[in-house]
Amino acid sequence: MTDRLPHEKGFHVSWDQIHRDSRALAWRLDHQGPGEGGVWTAVVAITRGGMAPAMILARELDIRVVDTISVKSYDHQTQAEAHVLKAPDAAMMGDGTGILVVDDLVDSGKTLELVRSLYPKAHFATVYAKPKGRPMVDTYVTEVSQDTWIFFPWDMALQYVEPYRGR
């Protein structure tokens, strides 16, 4: 067996799959907020990956207040130091109480660690979690191995693929 590059151990996620998995995340979060009846005050998507799951969660959980926090921690497939490019509304966020912060994936946990330091009482949810970042997440749907690269549908295009065994 040959050694593979990190991106070659891929988990390809379709639009249908991200929708199903985001709905499963919504089911886990339903009635779990701190408000009366377990209602969440708002959903905040970590851009860009958290936008699609956050939209689905907002719809499924009937959350009308939606905002974003833009955190840059990757340059293509290379991880870098995380920093905030755009913060959500400060008055809405407070310490994070009642806020559902959503991302597509937690990898190393550096992005969520940064956001959690800003909003320590927020609830952090991701669709997918890798072992190193899992302690930063309160709720997730699927765990994947640390060496798996997840290919999300917004990063992909349909094209021919060579068979696994070659030509």
Image (cartoon, grey):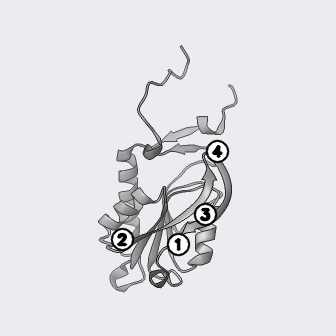
Amino acid type of disc 1?
Ala
Which residue does the numbered mark 3 point to in the structure image? Answer: 111
Circle 2/circle 3 CB separation < 8 Å: no
Q: Which mark is residue 87?
A: 1
Tell me which numbered mark, 1 or 4, is placed earlier along the sequence. Answer: 1
The amino acid sitting under disc 3 is Thr
As measured in the structure, the alpha-carbon distance from the residue carrying label 2 to the one carrying label 1 is: 26 Å
Q: Which mark is residue 30?
A: 2
Q: Name the residue at 59% across, 77% down.
A: 118
Seen from the viewer's position, the closer of residues 131 and 19 is: 19
Number of other residues with Cα within 10 Å of mark 3, as a class: few under 14, some 14 to 19, many 20 or more: many
The first of marks 4 and 2 along the sequence is 2
CA distance separating discs 4 and 2: 31 Å
Mark 1 neighbour density, 10 Å: few (under 14) some (14–19) many (20 or more) = some
Q: Earlier in the sequence, mark 3 or mark 4?
A: 3
Judge whether 32 appears above or below 57 on screen.
Answer: below
Identify the residue under disc 4: 147
User: 33 left or right of 76?
Assistant: left
Q: From the top left corner, tell me how far across and down residue 107 is, in percent.
A: 60, 55
Q: Is residue 166 visible?
A: yes
Q: Looking at the image, is mark 2 or mark 3 nearer the viewer?
A: 3
Based on the displayed image, in which of its 4 quarters is residue 137 positioned?
bottom right
Mark 2 or mark 3, which has the lower sequence index? 2
